[in-house]
Image (spheres, helix red, strand yellow):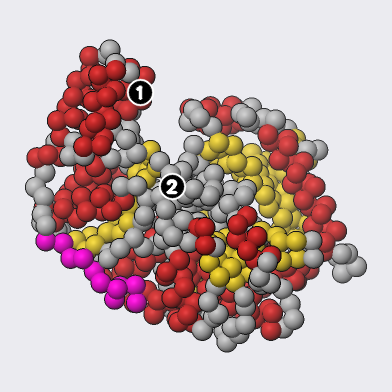
Amino acid sequence: MDADVRRRAEEWLAQDPDPETSGELRGLLDAGDEAALADRFGARLEFGTAGLRGELGAGPNRMNRVTVMRAAAGLAARLREGGVVIGYDARYGSERFALDTAAVVTGAGLRAWLLPRPLPTPVLAFAVRHLGASAGVMVTASHNPPRDNGYKVYWGDGAQIVPPLDAEISAEIDAVGRVDELPLGDGWTVLGEEVVEAYLQALEALPLGDARDVATVYTPLHGVGRDVLLRAFERAGFPRPAVVPEQGDPDPRFPTVAFPNPEEPGAMDLAIGLAEGSGADLVIANDPDADRCAVAVPTPRGWRRLTGDEVGGLLAEHVLRHTTGDRLLATTIVSSSLPAALAEAHGARSARTLTGFKWIMRAGEGLVYGYEEALGYSVGGPDGVIVRDKDGIGAALTVAALAAEAKRDGRTLPDLLDDQARRYGLHATAQLSIRVGDPSLISEAVGRLRAAPPSELAGRAVECVEDLARGVDGLPPTDGLRLRLAGSARVVVRPSGTEPKLKCYLEVVRPVRPEEDVAAVREEAQHDLDALRDALAGLLPS
């Protein structure tokens, strides 16, 4: 066995306060499992703008109490003063990691507030500004597999950190010594339900209108969204959603789904099954930390899951119709281009950012709405967005209001999508997501595509190849490529920031002439997207 790996493993054992991970590591050492030890000690989880996220287990390349305490100490060192509000979901280890963070933060002489129980990420993001905290920490891995956990850091403005803060905190983490020598405090404040009440009260500023007749089926996908969402619907006067019983309680095993992500095929099947038998108008799903919101609606052909871009466009126009003044809409370079057309038509401004709400929330003044295609939405009222991060609870409320308003008028959400297509052109989007076991394959694939981009895709000429690593549209550099194709189409290829995936984002824009049937144009656009997806799949690792 590599002597250096063994030395580092033994050093880790000496400071690890967790019997479970210590026992796991001792077992690997005793068994001489060199591959497993090299995996855990040959690399480490990198702290970046997404904080930390990874599989639970022993070693610096895993999420565990040592990793978390080092991160908390680095954050406290960068802050030097002030206070940190800490939230956590119901995943394995989340509460323990939150308590360790509170102990390290208070031991460093800072103030710490701990949310009262497992709660949605948007409650934590709201609480940062509500309490006047200097920073916030949310212990969650969102929609990742059951064996993952994560550590998301917010700054005092209530938004996730961006460079150079990530590098500054990472440097402080690197300077942390043994965690068993860190001073630990016990004087943190455990908040009561008043912080949840304040969040719910703030949601009253959302553009909800006065229509309330909508029957909803809801699933939190074994996460922490249920109780807060039900209270939000009750306060706003909506009928109580029917909750999928098999998925209603928090459960870190996520036993009914392959991945607890409403984007994944099959994740909403139980909810749609319940809706089919109950005559519901709407299905809403949150991911486990309730920052994302997925929507399905009935059609003559059966239930249809709306894409993130479709919901994003509907909510964008809804917000514009219910607000006035100087307003800004923001979305990302991988999302639909429809918001720019909507903003122009409604006398508002629009902006495109890099992927992630950390960038959307910094798009500019007057932000009343931001969204990204990955089911993330932040809805605002007259005074701007309520939460400076994606908010699956606020989005669910606003979708329900939109659906109730349409129902009152004898319309449906698909009808509203058709209206938008007629007015602004059909903006059809799709994704190709490739999950890989070896993360190095992702960077290799992007590198090959960068070195030798195709001249055509699915019969469309590639008119322009933009390297996002060099910066485009005045945005900071990021890994990925954007291909502009003939016929108002584009493709963006980039590594996922939170999962071992290569993600491709496709868009085809088709005008709809007055004599044309929108359904027929939609079918043609879908054929174009399928062809582009097949062409891309042939260029990328399987």
Mark 1 or mark 2, which is nearer the start of the sequence?
A: 1
Residue 417 in sight:
no
Amino acid type, label 2? Arg
Task: Give left or right: position of 2 versus 432.
Answer: left
Task: Give left or right: position of 525 versus 349.
Answer: right
Where, by quadrant of the figure, is residue 425 drawn? Answer: bottom right
Where does the image place residue 533, in percent across and percent down from the top left?
Answer: 71, 40
Task: Give left or right: position of 393 versus 412.
Answer: left
Q: Residues within 10 Å of mark 2 (few under 14, many from 20)?
A: some
Q: Residue 481 colored magenta?
A: no
Quarter of the rendering occupied by the N terminus: top left
Question: Which residue position is annotated with label 1?
Answer: 36
Where, by quadrant of the figure, is residue 191 drawn? Answer: bottom left
- In the image as oriented, which residue stretches furthest toward the bottom? 210
Where, by quadrant of the figure, is residue 274 drawn? Answer: bottom right
Where does the image place residue 42, in percent across and percent down from the top left?
Answer: 32, 24
Which structural element holds mark 2? loop
| Residue at screen point 10% across, 54% down | 185
| Residue at screen point 25% across, 37% down | 20
- Magenta segment, which residues? 187-197
| Residue at screen point 37% across, 45% down | 149
Identify the disc placed on residue 253. 2
* Front residue of this view, candidates 77 and 52: 52
- In the image as oriented, which residue stretches furthest toward the right? 515
Image position of 109 with respect to 431: above or below? below
Where does the image place residue 268, in percent across and percent down from the top left?
Answer: 60, 56
Which structural element holds mark 1? helix
